[in-house]
Amino acid sequence: MEENKQKRETKGIDTSIVYDFKEFPDEISGRCDNCGNTLFKSSVKDFVFLRECRECGMKKSI
Ligand SMILES: [Zn+2]
């Protein structure tokens, strides 16, 4: 997989992993830890609420 389009500066967080919100709460509430974006798309998978950053794709289960 090649993904080298970096529009924003990110912290290099692995976006292929789903992070647990309890273990990794937002550094700034409502903002992506990786790129600081505030727009997310949400989905529900296996009864778990997933929040995915629209910019970098970082995922958290909430
Ligand atoms: Zn992000």
Image (tube, grey):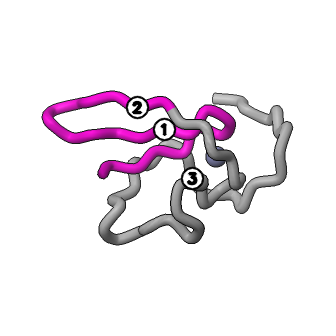
Which residue occupies the extreme left position in the image? 47
> Element type at marker 2?
strand
Tag on residue 42? Answer: 2
Q: CA distance from mark 1 to mark 3?
A: 13 Å
Tag on residue 14? Answer: 3
- Whether residue 51 sits left or right of residue 9 in the image: it is left
Tell me which corner region of the image, top left, top right, bottom left or bottom right, holds residue 25: bottom left
- Whether residue 18 sits left or right of residue 3 in the image: it is left
User: Is 59 or 4 nearer to us in this picture?
Assistant: 59
- Quadrant of the image containing the N terminus: top right
| Amino acid tagged 2 | Ser
User: Is 62 or 19 nearer to us in this picture?
Assistant: 62
Q: Give me the residue at 33% from left, 59% from top.
A: 20
Majority secondary structure in the magenta region: strand
| Amino acid tagged 3 | Asp
> Element type at marker 3?
loop
Q: Give me the residue at 60% from left, 37% from top.
A: 39
Per the rendered image, the range of residues in magenta is 41-62
Q: Give me the residue at 53% from left, 36% from top.
A: 40
Q: Which residue is mark 1?
A: 52
Please say whether residue 29 is one of the residues in the magenta stretch: no
Q: Look at discs 1 and 3 and give the one toward the viewer.
A: 1
The crowding category of the residue bearing disc 1, from other C-alpha atoms within 10 Å (few below 14, some 14 to 19, many at least 20), is many
Mark 2 or mark 3, which is nearer the start of the sequence? 3
Residue 61 pos. (x, y %):
32, 49
Residue 15 pos. (x, y %):
55, 45
| Amino acid tagged 1 | Glu
